[in-house]
């Protein structure tokens, strides 16, 4: 599905359950088959990902920071002086066995985003570590941005939390431990694919989070209502559950924590506004105890209200918010600023936040976006923030001259497609349907034909939420180990609600709560704005496993992992060529087009720029080619998620019938001529030449010589063959007139070096050994002239 630094990321395509007999159990339990069916309802072949060598549960910034932790500790402990002769491939101050020793480092996964942690917990202490393969649930997509032949990989990874996980209306708000519903960490990674190793390559990443409002709230779906009423289940005057949630975020991301609340603020009848009022009160209470420089930043914005207004541009306002957010948090890059950005710095670049270190930049803090469902509005807001961060990432790698990206460019179209696949996948997992409001909807360029599908989509959505969500929730509870079957207790299908499974403090004595004023972890607040998980300390070093390998061992050999020399394959089947490419899938094919992916193009210049111009079949093929593995697009009767706001005016066409599949109605000759003109393009526009034009004399002479050579070569007449055998001059002998040697993959002729070059090289070698050549007259006169002009 993706490649990050030579580490392959895979998607689970199929699973198999193997029955292991137990001698102590002779009779099968009567409820075992039913539990097995519930367990198998979790489809592991839908958006579950793993990697043998890369930790998907952590961000790229954490994984690369972890690589430096043991190195820094070893450097501080090493006291041996530097030797005169050393290996350039060894780390300074670290002695290896002849330069062949390499340290392999692995860390403990972040169990919040691991979905098979409960299954592996039983065997992790009895089997070898290689048997433990952690999987994540969410989304993974990768596309190739081709910048004048230079490949740049754009990767999007979404990690769905396994804590308080469930379906749309059955999981709202937060549980007693601070875990919120529909919590997803989205990370966009940009890397120069010319060099794929983490140590020598250029990598950049940006992380943002979505999640339900961290309060005790729910919605009653017992009555078939378009919008079930929002109910606050429990009073929390000291914001205890919100404090637990934000303490987790400070530990993982550092400060500042920025909340972008897209919930409605003005309503005739209180609905979404209930959540806004409670969230403001919770943030205000928590901020009064935090240091002023680390307070939680709260940004409220009624996105639905702006969408209804004809005078306001939603994306322009989101772009302003995105700029302010990225300037506060910064982003991660593993290389220092390029010389061109230091020499000619951009004004926006100088205002960028985060943490600047010797090896690059670190992202400090994170943006947390939420609406009611965290689906349509949240995905569009995250796209705009990601688009702004992508511009800074490209600028940091020296790929653009200004940190700014325009719509209708190949780069933004590619990025928008990744985010739409990302939004569709997350919406299907949580809400049982795809997105309705997309980026084009808020740009107000969505086709009007989408309106006709809304009634069927809304009915399908009600059916999914009312009849299938309960079964899906039972499967998730059993798979994640939230419910453990046991004798003498009610079965899973006998429970009226799973509230007590996710809120464990209701079934036991109340534990000692942390202070309502000092609501944070002391170690976390001490190291802010740095995230505590990335601080070099004894607690974090205990989570690492450092092992020394030979540099050619298979476990750490990137070449072996990427090129797979033990398999017979072709280049056409390799993943790097099969993934979506900006040059192949987005750039127009006409002659004279600027190949830059940052050039603004008209919507009709490329067929992929308007999704409504593709049939369902073409879109399905396109989705299969994409590395994003988004779910296949629905048909006319397919399910699509309902709107999160009242404005039902702007819809996105997801699969209208294309012009190719629509029969052409021939009304008159004028229409026929127009259709023919659109289908058959002139040769001049496609190939840049016209065969009807006369050829030049030079081209005619070259062509005639070519024809004569072909005729003389392929003559089969016996008399002509005898004549050629008698007359050696008649045989065609073609000799190359170029100076290039006849080299091949098996033999290379060494180049000849003239005497002067050899003398220069020998003098250079002798100079490194302290044997200097005498200066000539020209060098002496040049030096005297320099001294005279400089000092006299």
Image (spheres, rainbow, N blue to C red):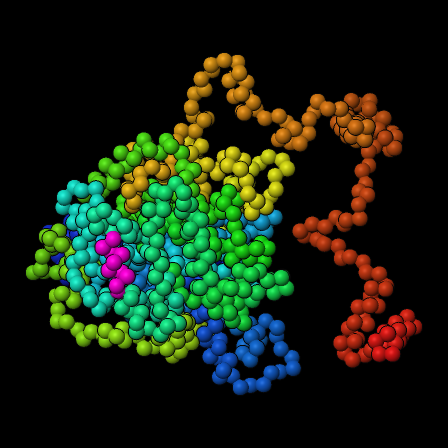
Position of residue 627 measured from the top left corner of the image (x, y, whole percent): 44, 47
Is 458 or 745 nearer to us in this picture?
458
- In the image, is 318 to the left or to the right of 191? left
Q: Residue at x 51, y 83 (%)?
A: 78
Is 133 or 216 nearer to us in this picture?
216
- Direction top: furthest residue: 668
Q: Residue at x 75, y 54 (%)?
A: 749
Position of residue 433 measured from the top left corner of the image (x, y, whole percent): 29, 43
Q: Residue at x 53, y 86 (%)?
A: 79
Q: Is residue 279 above or below residue 66?
A: above
Q: Residue at x 51, y 40 (%)?
A: 585
Q: Is residue 376 above or below residue 345?
A: above
Position of residue 573 measured from the top left corner of the image (x, y, whole percent): 50, 45
- In the image, is 497 to the left or to the right of 163? left
- Reply yes or no: does residue 592 show up in magenta: no
Location of the C terminus by quadrant is bottom right
User: What's drawn in magenta, residue-wise?
Assistant: 273-282
């Amino acid at each position: 599905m993706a490649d990050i630094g030579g580490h392959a990321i895979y998607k689970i395509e199929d699973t198999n359950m193997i029955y292991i007999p137990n001698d102590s159990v002779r009779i099968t339990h009567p409820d075992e088959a039913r539990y097995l069916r519930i367990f198998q309802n979790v489809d592991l072949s839908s958006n579950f990902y793993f990697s043998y060598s890369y930790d998907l549960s952590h961000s790229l910034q954490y994984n690369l920071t972890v690589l430096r932790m043991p190195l820094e500790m070893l450097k501080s402990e090493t006291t041996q002086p530097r030797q005169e002769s050393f290996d350039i491939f060894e780390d300074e101050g670290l002695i290896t066995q002849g330069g062949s020793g390499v340290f392999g480092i692995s860390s403990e996964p972040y169990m919040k985003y691991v979905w098979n942690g409960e299954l592996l917990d039983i065997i992790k202490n009895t089997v070898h570590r290689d048997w433990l393969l952690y999987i994540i649930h969410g989304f993974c997509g990768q596309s190739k941005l081709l910048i004048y032949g230079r490949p740049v990989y754009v990767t999007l990874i979404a990690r769905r939390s396994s804590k308080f996980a469930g379906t749309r209306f059955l999981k709202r708000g937060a549980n007693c431990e601070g875990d919120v519903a529909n919590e997803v960490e989205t990370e966009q990674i940009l890397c120069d694919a010319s060099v794929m190793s983490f140590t020598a390559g250029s990598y950049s990443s940006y992380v943002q989070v979505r999640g339900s409002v961290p309060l005790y709230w729910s919605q009653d779906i017992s009555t078939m209502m378009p919008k079930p009423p929002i109910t606050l289940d429990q009073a929390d005057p000291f914001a205890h559950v919100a404090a637990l949630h934000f303490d987790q975020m400070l530990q993982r991301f550092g400060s500042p924590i920025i909340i972008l609340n897209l919930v409605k603020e003005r309503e005739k009848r209180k609905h979404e506004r209930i959540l806004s009022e409670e969230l403001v009160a919770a943030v205000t209470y928590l901020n009064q105890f935090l240091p002023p420089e680390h307070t939680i930043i709260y940004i409220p914005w009624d996105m639905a209200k702006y969408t209804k207004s004809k005078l306001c541009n939603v994306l322009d306002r989101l772009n302003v918010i995105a700029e302010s957010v990225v300037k506060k948090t910064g982003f991660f890059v593993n290389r220092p600023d390029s010389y061109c950005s230091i020499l000619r710095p951009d004004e926006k670049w100088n205002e960028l936040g985060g943490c600047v270190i010797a090896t690059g930049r670190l992202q400090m803090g994170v943006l947390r976006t939420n609406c009611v469902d965290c689906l349509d509005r949240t995905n569009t807001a995250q796209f705009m923030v990601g688009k702004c961060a992508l511009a800074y990432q490209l600028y940091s790698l020296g790929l653009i001259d200004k940190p700014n990206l325009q719509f209708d460019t190949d780069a933004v179209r590619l990025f928008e497609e990744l985010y739409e696949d990302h939004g569709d996948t997350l919406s299907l997992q949580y809400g049982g349907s795809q997105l309705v409001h997309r980026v084009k909807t808020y740009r107000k360029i969505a086709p009007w034909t989408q309106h006709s599908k809304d009634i069927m989509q809304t009915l399908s959505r009600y059916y999914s939420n009312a009849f299938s969500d309960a079964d899906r929730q039972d499967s998730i509870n059993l798979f994640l180990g939230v419910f453990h079957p046991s004798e003498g207790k009610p079965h899973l299908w006998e429970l009226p609600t799973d509230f007590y499974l996710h809120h464990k403090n209701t079934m036991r004595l109340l534990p000692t709560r942390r202070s309502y004023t000092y609501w944070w972890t002391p170690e976390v607040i001490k190291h802010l704005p740095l995230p505590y998980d990335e601080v070099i300390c004894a607690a974090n070093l205990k989570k690492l496993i450092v092992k020394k390998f030979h540099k050619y061992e298979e476990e750490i050999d990137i070449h072996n992992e990427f090129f797979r020399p033990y398999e017979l394959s072709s280049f056409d089947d390799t993943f790097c060529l099969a993934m979506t490419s900006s040059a192949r899938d987005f750039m127009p094919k006409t002659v004279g087009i600027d190949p830059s992916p940052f050039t603004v193009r008209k919507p009709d210049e490329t067929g992929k720029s308007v999704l409504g111009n593709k049939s369902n079949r073409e879109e399905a093929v396109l989705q299969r080619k994409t590395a994003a593995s988004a779910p296949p697009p629905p048909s006319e009767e397919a399910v699509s998620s309902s709107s999160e706001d009242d404005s039902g005016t702007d819809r996105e066409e997801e699969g209208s019938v294309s012009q190719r599949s629509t029969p052409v109605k021939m009304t008159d000759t004028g229409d026929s001529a127009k259709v023919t003109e659109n289908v058959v393009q002139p040769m001049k526009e496609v190939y840049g030449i016209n065969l009807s034009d006369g050829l030049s004399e030079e081209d005619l002479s070259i062509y005639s010589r070519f024809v004569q050579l072909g005729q003389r070569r392929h003559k089969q007449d016996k008399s002509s063959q005898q004549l050629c055998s008698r007359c050696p001059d008649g045989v065609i002998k073609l000799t190359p007139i170029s100076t290039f040697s006849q080299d091949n993959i098996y033999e290379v002729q060494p180049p000849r070096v003239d005497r002067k070059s050899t003398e220069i090289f020998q003098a250079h070698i002798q100079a490194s050994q302290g044997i200097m050549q005498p200066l000539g007259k020209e060098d002496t006169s040049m030096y005297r002239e320099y001294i005279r002009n400089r000092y006299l």
